[in-house]
Image: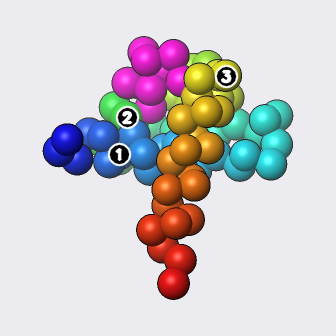
């Protein structure tokens, strides 16, 4: 599996979520990079986010964010 730039941007968005509180969402503003805006829209279209510009994680989004953040923790620990 190749890590395309689009997938990396989606992983970046998922890594922004605070998994300690599912009541805390994010907002990808119009001033964000076009890549971030597109990534949020794709995650919404995939059913991982509640809004096209971020919002809250869906149940599937929570699972994806948990896996994403766990992988990042493993890969960045020494």
Q: Residues within 10 Å of mark 2 (few under 14, many from 20)?
A: many
Question: Judging from the image, what secondary structure is the residue with disc 1 in?
Answer: helix
What residue sits right under mark 2 in the picture?
39
Question: Relative to the observer, which residue lies in front, 75 or 5?
Answer: 75
User: Dot 1, crowdedness within 10 Å: few (<14), some or many (≥20)?
Assistant: some
Q: Picture coordinates of residue 42 (x, y %)?
A: 38, 24
Q: In which quarter of the image is residue 55?
A: top right
Examine the rendered structure and indicate whether residue 7 appears above or below residue 51: below
Question: What residue is at 53 percent from the left and 77 percent from the top?
Answer: 77
* Residue 61 coordinates in the image, percent (x, y): 58, 29
SS class of the residue under badge 3? helix
Going 55% across and 44% down the picture, which residue do you hit? 67
Q: Can residue 48 be seen in this view?
A: yes
Display colour scheme: rainbow
Residue 9: assigned label: 1
Q: Mark 3 points at which residue?
A: 59
Q: How far apart are marks 1 and 2 (CA)?
A: 6 Å
Q: Which residue is drawn at 49% across and 61% down?
A: 72
Give x and y (percent) for residue 35: 30, 42
Left or right: 39 as drawn, with respect to 25: left
Numbered range of the magenta stretch: 40-49
Labels 1 and 3: the sequence-earlier one? 1
Secondary structure beneath label 2? helix
Q: Mark 1 to mark 3: distance in Å?
A: 20 Å
Q: What main secondary structure does the magenta stretch of the protein show?
A: helix
Q: Is residue 69 left or right of residue 35?
A: right
Image quadrant where one finds the N terminus: top left
């Amino acid at each position: 599996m190749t890590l395309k730039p689009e997938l990396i941007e989606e992983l970046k968005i998922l890594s922004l979520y605070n998994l300690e509180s599912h009541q805390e969402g994010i907002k990808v503003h119009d001033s964000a990079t076009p890549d971030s805006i597109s990534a949020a829209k794709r995650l919404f279209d995939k059913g991982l986010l509640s809004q096209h510009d971020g919002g809250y994680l869906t149940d599937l989004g929570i699972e994806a964010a948990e896996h994403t953040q766990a992988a990042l923790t493993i890969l960045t620990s020494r």
